[in-house]
Image: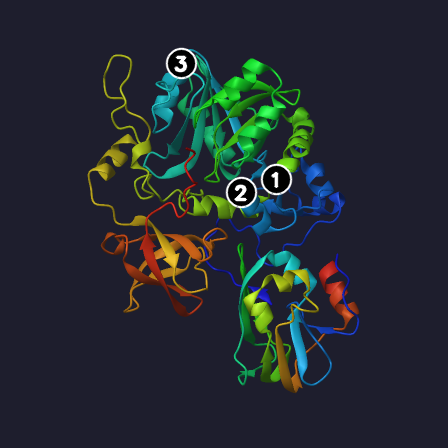
């Protein structure tokens, strides 16, 4: 089981989010491992609005496709074009180079601490 | 992030719905109640992500779906298929009984050859697709999908009753591993030490089988597979499975072989345009629907030369002479989002003209591919259609199957 960074917050749908503003968003190593090799990312455009708890993108592997739920409400200020061009970054470095979005935060949805997320995935 | 359920109907290939977690310890897998095959501990030791499949705990992937897929296309992959069913049908009446029980002509199969065939219901619906080997003059080996072993076994017992035939389920005692890819022949050649046996293995034709001792393990070696590559399937006593598995890995790894999981197996067979029971084939499908009319031998005769009435013959004969209501086609995705099992196929006016049976981003081709049943009017190669991918129409084009054909050996 991959280590879960303690400085991040999490959703029950396996996204992580930083506490700063703009907040950086990605998917957890547990999620990336379960998906398998990510081959395609569909992410919102810079300037678009995302809503906490709502779908903001899709992540596709050879075996399955999953929706990405935004942990926060706000405006997308940056999209990780490196990861769009090379989605394998999501598998190799999900908490680093495999980040997905930066969002100027208006409000946050219900989030889990690292320990609560660990309990969720190990439970 | 949550998985999107692509279709309401049950399907065999639901390998990696989100929530499938890697199994770090052998003990953890016991909690899902799935059966463990003879190679379970090998998979766990290799760090495989295990998944429940047809009641078994099977390796989904070892390291990477894509790497395993590509290894099979470029070198070789080693697959555990021990969940599949092996049913021996033997006796003086076995050939005639199989001719009545299955849609193919099995009595006419030469010893040492294999045939792709089907078990159909009386109404012509497919109960399972099978590979049948004639191992001896009076013995055949029927290989069934894991999810259908019970159905195949009970149907064969019923259909062969009172005909001097013994039907034996050997699934539990039999392990099946596949070595698939362009390096498979060289790997097998290294593992078969007896010169005559080695020559026989290397000289095997497609859909032929021979007995040989492989890495010290007596095996039925068949040149068959489900990947679109050259390769072999090895039937061995389950007690010898681990020794064989390790030997193939040891000899194969320097030649680029990797262990490969069910995820790669599914993407490989899809590229090769091969049907999967539960997706392209099911109880409501006739062989003709799937473009497999050729496996139905309507001209079978009994030893006296009279037409042979096999199970499903009348409805299948009627089907053969009529226009099908749907056709299995290949679809090439023209955008990035892949069509998945159950998604509607639509025209540019939004009319539903079919449904996707299997779909994925093709690792070899670099674009999405899918198989789908569509109405005959839109089945011609080149027809432009769309697939409703979670509410958005993604353009696709009808293409010939298979999507991938291996470079011919010259």
For label 1, the crowd category at 10 Å Cα-Cα, with few meaning under 14, some 14 to 19 and many 20 or more, is some
Q: Are marks 1 and 3 on the same chain?
A: yes
For label 2, the crowd category at 10 Å Cα-Cα, with few meaning under 14, some 14 to 19 and many 20 or more, is some
CA distance for labels 3 and 2 = 44 Å
Q: Position of residue B192 (x, y in %)?
A: 60, 21
Q: Decide: marks 1, 2 in contact (CB < 8 A)?
A: yes
Q: Which residue is mark 2?
A: B74
Mark closer to the chain start, 1 or 2: 2
Q: Which residue is mark 1?
A: B256
Q: Is residue B132 above or below residue B331?
A: above
Q: Is residue B123 above or below residue A73?
A: above
Q: Looking at the image, how many numbered discs can be counted on the residues?
A: 3
Which residue is located at x 68 percent, y 52 percent?
Answer: B22
Q: Secondary structure at mark 1?
A: loop
Instruction: Name the chain under label 3.
Output: B
Name the front one of labels 3 and 2. Answer: 2
Q: Decide: marks 1, 3 in contact (CB < 8 A)?
A: no
Mark closer to the chain start, 1 or 3: 3
In the rendered structure, the answer to whether residue B286 lies left or right of residue A108 reads left
């Amino acid at each position: 089981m991959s280590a879960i960074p303690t400085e991040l917050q999490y959703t029950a749908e396996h996204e992580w989010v930083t506490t700063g503003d703009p907040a950086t968003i990605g998917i957890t190593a547990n999620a990336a491992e379960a998906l398998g090799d990510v081959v395609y990312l569909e992410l919102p455009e810079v300037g678009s609005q995302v809503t906490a708890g709502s779908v903001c993108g899709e992540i596709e592997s050879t075996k399955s496709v999953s929706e990405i739920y935004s942990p926060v409400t706000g405006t997308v200020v940056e999209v990780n074009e490196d990861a769009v061009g090379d989605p394998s970054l999501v598998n190799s470095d999900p908490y680093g180079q495999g980040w997905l979005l930066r969002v100027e935060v208006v409000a946050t949805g219900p989030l889990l601490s690292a320990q609560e997320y660990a309990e969720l995935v190990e439970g | 992030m949550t998985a999107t359920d692509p279709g309401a109907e049950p399907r065999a290939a639901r390998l990696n719905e989100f929530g499938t977690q890697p199994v770090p310890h052998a003990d953890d897998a016991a909690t899902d109640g799935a059966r463990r095959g003879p190679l379970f501990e090998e998979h766990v030791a290799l760090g495989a992500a295990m998944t429940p499949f047809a009641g078994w705990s099977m390796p989904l992937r070892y390291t990477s779906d894509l790497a395993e897929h590509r290894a099979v296309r470029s070198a070789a992959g080693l697959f555990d298929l021990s969940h599949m069913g092996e049913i021996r049908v033997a006796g003086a009446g076995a050939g005639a009984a199989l001719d009545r029980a299955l849609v193919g002509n099995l009595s006419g199969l030469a010893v040492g050859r294999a045939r792709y065939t089907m078990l159909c219901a009386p109404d012509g619906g497919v109960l399972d697709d099978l590979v049948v080997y004639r191992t001896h003059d009076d013995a055949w080996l029927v290989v069934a999908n894991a999810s259908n072993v019970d159905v195949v076994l009970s149907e064969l017992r019923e259909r062969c009753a009172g005909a001097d035939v013994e039907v034996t389920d050997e699934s539990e005692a039999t392990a099946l591993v596949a070595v698939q890819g362009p390096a498979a022949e060289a790997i097998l050649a290294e593992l078969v030490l007896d010169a005559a046996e080695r020559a026989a293995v290397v000289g095997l034709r497609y859909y032929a089988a021979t007995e040989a001792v492989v890495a010290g393990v007596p095996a039925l070696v068949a040149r068959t597979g489900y990947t679109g590559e050259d390769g072999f399937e090895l039937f061995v006593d389950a007690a010898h499975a681990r020794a064989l598995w390790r030997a193939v890995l040891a000899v194969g790894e320097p030649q680029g072989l990797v262990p490969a999981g069910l995820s790669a197996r599914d993407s490989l067979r899809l590229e090769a345009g091969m049907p999967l029971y539960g997706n392209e084939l099911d109880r409501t499908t006739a062989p003709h629907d799937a473009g497999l009319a050729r496996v139905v031998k309507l001209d079978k005769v009994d030893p006296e030369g009279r037409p042979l009435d096999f199970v499903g013959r009348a409805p299948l004969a009627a089907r053969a002479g009529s226009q099908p209501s749907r056709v299995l086609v290949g679809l090439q995705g023209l955008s990035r989002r892949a069509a998945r099992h159950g998604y509607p196929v639509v025209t540019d006016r939004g009319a539903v003209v079919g449904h996707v049976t299997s779909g994925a981003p093709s690792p070899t081709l670099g674009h999405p591919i899918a198989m789908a049943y569509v109405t005959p009017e839109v089945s011609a190669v080149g027809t432009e259609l769309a697939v409703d991918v979670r509410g958005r129409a993604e353009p696709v084009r009808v293409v010939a199957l298979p999507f991938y054909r291996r470079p011919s050996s010259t």
